[in-house]
Image (spheres, rainbow, N blue to C red):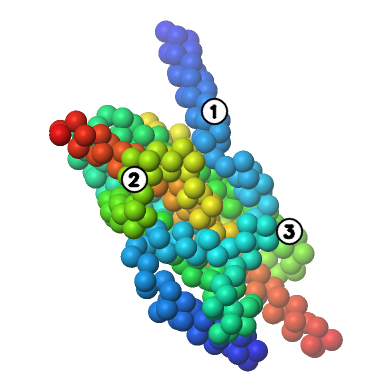
Amino acid sequence: MSSAVKLVPVQEAYDDLLTRTLVRIPCDLGRLIYLASTRDYNSGNYYHEGLANRFRPEVARKALEIAHRQAFYKLSAFSLQSLVSDLEAYLQSTRENPHEFLRAWQRLEPYRVAIPAEVNLTVARLFTSNLRLALAILRYRQAQNHSSH
Amino acid sequence: MIGTTTALIGAAVLLVVILVWIRGQSASRHSPAVMEDWLTGQDDITDACPPEFVSQIFSSRDFEFISQMESVDLKRLFLRERNAVALLWVQQTAAAIRRIMRRHLEASRLSADIEFKTEARILLQYGQLRLICGALFLLIGLGGLQRLQWMALRADKLTQRISNVLREFESGAQSREMDGMQSS
């Protein structure tokens, strides 16, 4: 009974997060990066001011944690082809110079911080590996376009 | 004649062992530093790699996509990356099953009513799984991962089966313990 009482507001907070915030982000990688950014690097706790005001902070924290893990598993299950398209959409949404973006992402691998805690290690490795490959593919395509012009 | 053949076979086996060892070392170098801690420290038997990811790691879909690019470098990078993921999965599965069996042996020692048939079945499945993991460890990198998909899925199914049997065993032992406490 008590767990059911706890789960209902978490579900509500989760739905709220989905319909108010995440739906506005155009791609899955963007959603993942956004959710990872709501996590404090020092404590590992999630925080979202609007959500914490509408619900209790611990409810908001749990909803963010669940949403982060789901976004991660969803993206990790993408085929390489779908991931390349999603990465391309994310790149366009950032409005950065594509060449610089790809170079920085290959060198710094910032997507590593987007991995939630307590996920399966093989899936985490698959995620970073696929992103590394997707970046290499986009770089390759960029070079191909450059040489054909 | 027999002596020469035996020596050749011995040398070939030794070479394979050395190659496997080198690959194992290289794979662990590519893995995060926390891996060892993680492999030995995790104790939740339900936190196995979801089957759809096992299928994905060993599928041909991504390889076909990469092949369309007609870039040798990309193909090489793909094979290196995917082999490292596959090797990590094998190591994770082997470590998980060792942990599960250790837990089961501890529980069996304390249990009064052990069924020989169930224990034999668990042992047989465990042996089979160890064999498959060993074979996968040897074969990953030698041939295409796609050809090993059935073996990987078989290993995954066996891991789940053993986990389920042992979970039932543990919950059975717990309920018997509860019954015993209530009756006394």
Q: Nearer the viewer, residue A68 or B15?
A: A68
Amino acid carrying mark 3 in the image: Glu
Local packing at callout 2 (Cα closer than 10 Å; few below 14, some 14-19, many 20+) is: few
Amino acid carrying mark 1 in the image: Trp
Identify the mark at residue B106; answer none if there is no mark.
3
Residue B27: x %, y % from top left: 51, 35
**Residue at image point 55% right, 69% down:** A65
Q: Distance between the residues labelled 1 and 2?
A: 43 Å
Q: Nearer the viewer, residue A68 or B104?
A: A68
Q: Is residue A17 visible?
A: yes
The chain holding disc 1 is B
Q: In this view, does A138 lie above or below A148?
A: below
Identify the mark at residue B122; answer none if there is no mark.
none
The residue that mark 1 highlights is B21
SS for tag 2?
loop
Q: Is residue B60 left or right of residue A72?
A: left
Amino acid carrying mark 2 in the image: Asn
Q: Is residue A63 above or below residue B152?
A: below
Q: Residue furthest right?
A: B184
Residue A94: x %, y % from top left: 37, 55
The chain holding disc 2 is A
Q: Which of marks 3 and 1 is nearer the N terminus?
A: 1
**Quadrant location of the C terminus of chain B in the rendered image:** bottom right
**Residue at image point 47% right, 63% down:** A34
**Residue at image point 42% right, 64% down:** A31
The chain holding disc 3 is B
**Quadrant location of the N terminus of chain B in the rendered image:** top left
Identify the mark at residue A97; answer none if there is no mark.
2
